[in-house]
Amino acid sequence: MTFLSELVEKLARPAQDIRAEHLREWANSVPGTIPIADVQCRCRCKIAGVIQNVRIDPREGSGSIEATIDDGSGRLVVKWLGRQKLSGIGLGNGLILEGTIGEGRGKQLQVLNPDYQLIPAPEHG
Amino acid sequence: MAKTAEALKRVVLGRPMSSGELGHTLLPKSIALPVFSSDPLSSNAYATQEAMIVLSLAGAAGLAMIVPVSIAVAALLFIVVTSYRETVKAYPTGGGAYRVAHENLGMYPGLLAASALLIDYVLTVSVSITAGVEAMVSASEALGPYKIGLAFAFIAFVTLMNLRGVKESGTLFAIPTYGFVLAIYLMIVTGIVKCLGGGCPEAESARHMADLHLETAVSYVLLLRAFAAGTTALTGVEAIADGVPAFRYPQSKNAATTLLIMAALSTSMFLGISWLADGTNVVFTEHPPGQRTVVAQIAAAVFEGGPMFYVVQIMSTAILILAANTAYQDFPRLSSILAKDRYMPRQFMNRGDRLVFSNGVIILALLSGLLIYVFDANLTQLIQLYLVGVFISFTLSQTGMVVRGRRLRPPGWQRSALISGFGGTVTGIVLVVIAYSKFAKGAWIVIASIPVVMFAMRSVYVHYKDVADQLGHPARRPTDRRPGNAHFVILVNRVDSATARAVGYARSTRAADITAVTFDSANHGPWRRLAPDIPLQTLTGRKTEALLTNLREKRSNLGSDDFLTVMTPEILRSRGLFEIVRRPGLHRLKAVLVREPDVQVLDIPILRDDIDPEVDQAHEPGRNHVIVLISGVHNAMLQATEYAETLRPTDIRAVSFGLEPEETEKLGDQWLEARVPHPLEIEESPFRDLGISLERYLDRFNPDGVNKVVTIVIPEFIVRKRRHQILHGQTALIVKRRMLFESGVVVVSVPYHL
């Protein structure tokens, strides 16, 4: 019976978990980057992730745009101030960025106006 | 329990795939060929004999014409394929007859092509499956009584394979398709070698040649009818043109090459079979006592009944069953294109767990199953309905290409217009011949249902267009951005913790006016202890009417920016869908309220386990985060945002789930253009399940319902005619069902009456 319940457990494994694993593998394959889970505050580091959420805020000054990226180990908010449009920042796109990581709203890891580079997203993303 | 069900589903259908895996399901040519051509290739199993049935009416002299007739059919196939190669190059995003006709000839020809094709895809499944079952039954007569059951089993099998996804089913289907081609080639080559060696084997039916009953002489009409019957070899050519987006890159080029390979295979097999049928003197008539198929007779003669005979038979059966697969590729794809163009309900655009257009697959299975059931799995009757649709679409598609050539004049257009024009004329003539010769035998059913389907698609289009016009209409666009006031009516069923939360919630919005209504005067005592400042009124008479009268009276005194909200607090005993049906009265009431203009319905559910008697005394939540679920920028969404503002919440954001990546920027631009003073978030929904994505999104708020509440505002379209509701996404229902059991989440419907 334990065998059966283990099998059920394995088969019913949430699709998100499987996807997170694919994402981790993909992010690991990008040279020079570290997983988001290993990021220390105030460090300057390079990170690869897939855009999972895009936020446009028309209120703050001349506006801001935020993208939440996920690399399977954690999430990080990338924020560009003073602009409302950023081409290529679309859901599911891959992003490599380099900048100083801080903390934003709700203790969420956040990086402001980083250098970034768009890359194709993983096939399994 | 839920886990076991999920595990079982994975075993049958496979693991859910994320949208990013879509590119992964593109087909290489070697797989695309069997996936898209099992239908045209399989028709070789019966195309020759269909023509021979007609020719046999003129006796031996008629049957002798099989080779010339077959050459004519093969030539037509090449004309059509050449023409379709041009189409594929001109329409890299999929150039089915519908697209070409719709774009070049207009809406009605487009719909004509679409409905003809949809009907024909259903027939492809019914005919192929029935033919396969027939072949099995003739191999073993004991199976006779189970024909319908067998047919249903095959439909279920093909349906399941297709729900798993294109690629896997493609690999599985490659084996019988290539096996059939090889087996037939081996038969043809062996036969030709024997015949050229001087010892052409005689078929078992050759001795009947002399006693053929002469019904007519060889005439042009007879030859034309035989030719029309032989054109079954052309069915399915459409599939490749329609399926260009399923090919690997470069898509057009790969599709054009595959078309050519398919044509070469199909014509050579067809001509080979016809030539051998002539060489071995096969006789095939309409009412045969114990007559075997032409291919079976040839195989028996050529291989002298050896094991290769059985290989040919098994492969024929297998490919006939799998020919249905072509339609399974095409029907869902065409219906998704039609849904995108708003001619079919938008649900046909949704990709299921395995990135397949599951709804199309299921509808196709149901319709073809129904057809088999109605026709009692009778092949001779079913086959009469076939072909009309195919030739309507061929003719329209090629006419469309001629018009396109004349309009756009791309380099070399004269040549391709000539090819298409010629092809179109010939297929047009064949169409007339087929419709004429099959009309009374059953083709009338198809000819009669095409206009019905066309009309239905047009009505869907008119409805969607009407909705879009209203949603974008500037006169109904809310412009005043000063938030109005909230007016609450609390529907008190019993005075309990849920009611207490409703009171707290209403107070926290600084509403202009809060009242309460009840149907039970016994509630007055406890109510005075809970909220002495809020008047409670007892309604008498029929519940729904009394409530509506009360609401209408309140609504008439409302300011122009104000919103009237009915709060429905309820205590749920447990998590589980049973809770939803436990109180049918309340749900009926809510359904009526949603249809009432200018009344919003706010659900405050609370799980019995979450009740904390200490704090649930009309405690005002300190923070209220409002999420407006949106699908686009339009009037209904703007109204919902205005409503959200009247709640005086901690913050408001609009959230859109599961857009295609390329739509992200478009929505962002529209948002900025509409000048809504709130942030917009576009959140992915990798598994295309709004409920799951929303739950995951709410994780970052972690509401407790007491100090922190999340309010989900759903703009809901209310259509005038109830039957039209099916044409709209069931977003509101999905969200309400999922969020009912999330603690601290309040759901409001803001109906927009069209």
Image (cartoon, helix red, strand yellow):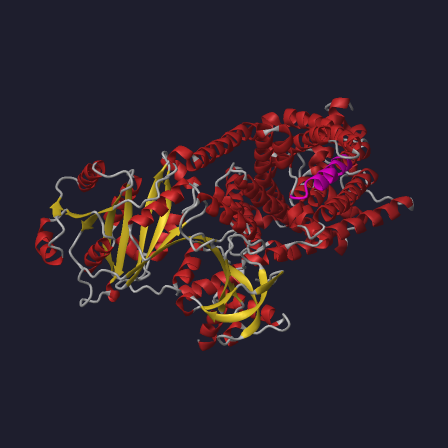
Question: Please, which residue is most extreme toward the right here?
Answer: B197
| Residue B18: quadrant of the picture | bottom right
| Residue B545: quadrant of the picture | top left
**Image quarter of the C terminus of chain A:** bottom right
Can the viewer see residue B748 in this picture?
A: yes
Residue extent of the magenta highlight: B78-93
Viewer-proximal residue among B142 and B617: B617
Image-based side of B735 in relation to B169, left or right = left
Viewer-proximal residue among A122 and B452: A122
Residue depicted at x 13% and y 58%:
B530
- Residue B225 falls inside the magenta stretch: no
Task: Label the magenta part by its dominant secondary structure.
Answer: helix
Image-based side of B543 in relation to A93, left or right = left
Residue depicted at x 81% and y 47%:
B188
- x, y (%) of residue B342? 51, 38
Can the viewer see residue B443 in this picture?
A: no
Image-based side of A69 in relation to B176, left or right = left
- x, y (%) of residue B495? 15, 56
Viewer-proximal residue among B519 and B289: B519
Viewer-proximal residue among A113 and B28: A113
- x, y (%) of residue B386? 62, 35
Residue depicted at x 42% and y 62%:
B696
- x, y (%) of residue B315? 70, 52
Can you say whether B430 is above or below B657 in the image? above
Count of numbered circles in the view? 0
**Image quarter of the N terminus of chain A:** bottom left
Image-based side of B240 in relation to B75, left or right = left
Can you say whether A6 is above or below B608 in the image? below
